[in-house]
Image (cartoon, grey):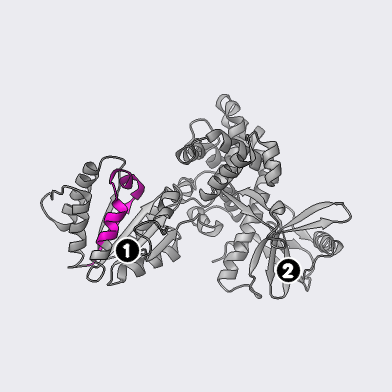
Amino acid sequence: MKFYGREKQKKQLHQLFQSDCQKIALIYGRRRIGKSELIRQCLRETKVKSIYYECKQTTEWNNTDSLSEIVSDVFGYPKLAFESIEQLLKFLFEQSQKEKLILVLDEYPYIRENVKGLDSILQALVDQYQYDSGMKLIVCGSYVDTMKSLLSKQNPLYGRVDLTIDLKQMDYFESALFYQQFSEEDRVRLYSVFGGIPYYNRLIDSEKTVKENMIDLIASPGARLENEVSMYLHSEISKITNANEVFETLAKGFSKYKDILDQSHVSSGPTLVDVLDKLIRMDLVKKEAPINDENNKRKAGYFIIDNLSLFYYKYIFRNASRMSVMDPDIFYQKFIHTDFETQHVPHVFEDLCRQYLIRMNRMGKIEEPFEKIGKYYYDDPVQGKNEEFDIVTKDDQGYIFYEAKFKKDPITNKIIENEIEQVQRTGLSCYKYGFFSRSGFACANHKDCIFIDLKELYLQ
């Protein structure tokens, strides 16, 4: 199967492989994010001798024996026998004095649990062979807190890691490489369900419609990803009930801390803080403050950033009993279709447009590079309430306010004039206006406006 994206990380790893010196890399990220496949792809592309070992949740002896078999195969030796992991690792470091060698310890937390003092063992070997070794040691794992602890000052490996890769979700553009056969509109829909997780995107069948993929993969009893979200939460969180409460509340659109506490059944404020912090560390939720008032904690909001989790808690979790007794097509039509098209996809489209602006900014394709992007909160004196603009950038000249429309009709002069009038009515500082449109534009050119249609978001 073809490998997509991750160009920056691939370049980093290949630079590490090519070095003549000993190098240590730490790679971590949530389950299904593509860590192992990234490493394996880079190993396929290099000529440096490599040993890839996926650690097991078993005894030190079992891991030692399994890794010994791989080492014997790579070096073409009869079955080697080692009494411990330390002895085996020492052998590999000694071999790396003769030729460059890549050693990958994937799912490192598993073996770390069963080998007392393994961090210290690695530290001692790294220090002992640092001047005459060509070892490229890659330590990889999905338990993010455990992996991050290897970088702490208290850990023996502190200061010895040359490359750290915290692998995140792919953006909308790289995700779409998995389903290029679909129209631009359908790519937005698919991203709004499966997000930037490579494992999910590999499951999408280009021979089926978006609806059929949704039903087959998550919106039907026994679907491949039906229990994916709950399984991931169970692996990381002990009190799953509180996480479910918080997710359901966020999926309904409540984002402020007080509203989440009021609307959910989480027992207390400290408990809610703990749950939110854990979900943020798991890269499922983000905390975002307005770019025009970043230090105002009361205006900060919490948002689900994992699209499969958002979809699951919007449509599947609360309707699981109904889904189990209904025809999948009827269930989809009754409980998903309308809200999905009118609310869910347009909401995710806004995030997709933010990603596009960041992508262009990093590539140097924004006329006036911006230093901030996010939401802009303000008080509407006419309506007498607080409002927000969802996509706003700030550069040296000031703010640009963007509007994203995922509708069947093109953007007209009236829509543009209403947007400009809304900004001017509130007295906000803005020197340009931007518009994203699914269906193009039916309007005259405006000197202070930027027009971006859907096709432009997917151009190379």
Quadrant in which residue 291 is drawn? bottom right
Quadrant in which residue 354 is drawn? bottom right
Q: Is residue 253 above or below residue 239?
A: below
Between 102 and 296, the residue placed more toward the observer is: 296
Report the residue that reaches farthest toward the left. 78
Q: Residue at x 87, y 52 (%)?
A: 383
Asked if residue 102 shows in the view, the reply is no
Q: Position of residue 266 (x, y in %)?
A: 62, 35
Amino acid type at mark 1: Glu
232 left or right of 136 in image: right
Q: Which residues fall within the magenta stretch?
A: 100-125
| Within-10-Å neighbours for mark 2: few <14, some 14–19, many 20+ | many
Q: Which residue is mark 1?
A: 45
Which mark is on residue 386?
Answer: none
Which part of the image, by quadrant, shows the C terminus?
A: bottom right
Q: Position of residue 273 (x, y in %)?
A: 60, 44
Q: Position of residue 381 (x, y in %)?
A: 87, 56
Amino acid type at mark 2: Tyr
Q: CA distance from mark 2 to mark 1?
A: 44 Å
Q: Which residue is mark 2?
A: 399
Asked if residue 86 shows in the view, the reply is yes
